Amino acid sequence: MMAYGIASPALAELPVERLRLPAGFRIEVLTDQVPNARAMALGDFADGRGVVYVGSRAEGKVYGVEIDKGRARRVHTLASGLTLPVGVAYRDGSLYVSAVSRILALDGIAGRLDKPPVPRVVTAGFPAETHHGWKFIAFGPDGWLYVPVGAPCNVCDSPDARYASIQRMRPDGSGVEVVARGVRNTVGFDWNPADGSLWFTDNGRDMLGDDVPSDELNRVSKPGEHFGYPYCHQGDVPDPEFGKGRECARFTPPAVKLGAHVAALGMRFYTGRAFPAAYRKSLFVAEHGSWNRSRKSGYRVVRVEVDKAGKAVRQEAFVEGWLQVDAAGKESVWGRPADVLVLPDGSLLISDDQTGAIYRVVYEGRDS
């Protein structure tokens, strides 16, 4: 276990040379000292120095990675013993952490990395069910904290309307309201800087075969919009049990079908200026990878191009190679992307919960 404030030792030999990126891009290991690294949040940065906060699932810990001009200097353990503290969000000096039924806050954290404060309970009003109970959280441009509540099952129609939704609340935990419904399990969302619209990934249900349904990338156009779960999947596939008598046309279809079982998790719009101009209105999606498909899918980061009208027009692989296939067709996996985050210098971070690493993607080519 990494102790408080201990500098990272030499990096392990992760085979980053196996990773494939577009021409002009380079990927490196920022740190490999963040066990089960999942969601990331940007803290205060100035002159290239700041902190990236990282949640985890299996370890029950929350981390702070001190960064100095593109290099990780120290990794701090900020909390431990929490229940699935995947989500982290930073605002006004406090780090907010999701822990299934609770949202916690570590106040004044930036100045207390070596001696973190005891987490303050902001609210304990969310369901305690752990199936899809871990939560990605983020502050929206409206200043509210957005908190999803996943379905407590593979597929079910729960009478508790809190499930399968994205909700928002004020920073003090008050005023909870539903933003989107029919959302099976989102573990990543962001706001389009061009128009302020909320986009989110959603994991499709299991046990309908290798190729159905697709994971989704969705766009919220109005409060309370319904995205189909559990009645309709990927916009056009009625559920064999819960879809009877329901028309898929009644629900909002996905903006993009990402592929079956790719396990799309964290996503961010690219807001930096270091990448070529063509990338600057794109969004990046971390695909964690399938767990029960006969041939594996995902295990990569994809780029989705969004046009001036706010419509997703194309998707393509951006980083791939964590999934390897040998000459005999045997598959092996050495890493699983979980989240992406844009640093102020325009580089892109990618967390990997299998290796406990955070990678950094930089552009070194010439912008055309």
Image (cartoon, helix red, strand yellow):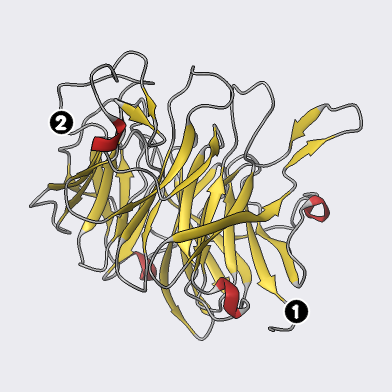
Pick the front one: 230 or 312: 312
Image quarter (top left, top right, bottom left or bottom right) of the C terminus: bottom right
Estimate how packed mark 1 is, as few (under 14), some (14 to 19) or many (20 or more) residues with alpha carbons within 10 Å.
few
Residue 227 sits in which quadrant? top left
Callout 2: SS: loop
- Position of 203 compared to 99: left or right? right
Q: Horizontal and vertical percent for residue 172?
A: 13, 56
Residue lying furthest right: 327
Estimate how packed mark 2 is, as few (under 14), some (14 to 19) or many (20 or more) residues with alpha carbons within 10 Å.
few
Q: Name the residue: 66% across, 43% down.
A: 355
Q: Horizontal and vertical percent for residue 19?
A: 76, 53
Q: Name the residue: 52% across, 71% down.
A: 343
Q: Amino acid at mark 2?
A: Ala
Return the disc, 2 or 1, that comes first in the chain's sequence.
2
Name the mark on residue 166: none
List the residue tagged with mark 2. Answer: 161
List the residue tagged with mark 1. Answer: 365
Q: Horizontal and vertical percent for residue 349?
A: 58, 62
Q: Is residue 47 above or below residue 263?
A: below
Does the residue at mark 2 contact the one at mark 1 (Cβ under 8 Å)? no
